[in-house]
Image: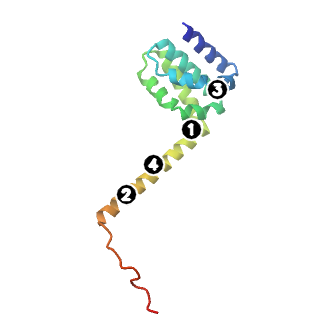
Amino acid sequence: RVLYFGLSILVNLADMGGADLVLLHRGGDLLVEMLSAMDENVAYYAVAGVQNLSCYPDCINLLLDLRADEELKRLLTQSPSEHVQQSSAGALANIRASTQYAARLAAEEKAERERAAREAARQQAEARGPAAPTEVGAGAPAV
């Protein structure tokens, strides 16, 4: 019951303009951690708090860094609670509408393209076989 009370305070504080206080005291970290709770009431408080935090642009980076969007997707499809699903959908919509989310996606896509290019280059080099050794000074003009 104490956990419910504490989470309720965080949820309401974030809803009433106190998101900066929630973050200052690492309440955002706790809310995201509690998204995976087995207790449905704890999960509901956590997702409601994350939804409230997701309304503030300053909170989006933290939510993305903690991979809250991944847990919200899981809750959206796997939670038996309609309330948890609705709050998850709302939080995801807020996160996905942010400029930070778009920037994060672009950076991840760029990193994946670069990784794929390095892998392709490695495979091509491997297919060519080992490079033939060259003599030191070969091809240099005689003095």
Sequence order check: which comes first, mark 4 or mark 2? 4
Circle 1 is placed at which residue position? 101
Residue drawn at x 63%, y 27% is 55
Sequence order check: which comes first, mark 4 or mark 1? 1
Q: How is the image coloured?
A: rainbow
* Up-down relation of residue 40 to residue 35 (above or below): above
Residue drawn at x 38%, y 83% is 138
Could you tell me which secondary element the residue under label 3 belongs to?
A: helix
* Foreground pick, 141 / 52: 141
| Residue 19, position as x, y percentages in the image | 67, 24
Q: Is residue 47 left or right of residue 20?
A: left
Circle nearer the viewer, 3 or 1? 3
Q: Which mark is residue 120?
A: 2
Q: Which mark is residue 23?
A: 3
Could you tell me which secondary element the residue under label 4 belongs to?
A: helix
Q: Amino acid at mark 1?
A: Tyr
Q: Residues within 10 Å of mark 4 (few under 14, many from 20)?
A: few
Q: Which mark is residue 112?
A: 4
Could you tell me which secondary element the residue under label 1 belongs to?
A: helix
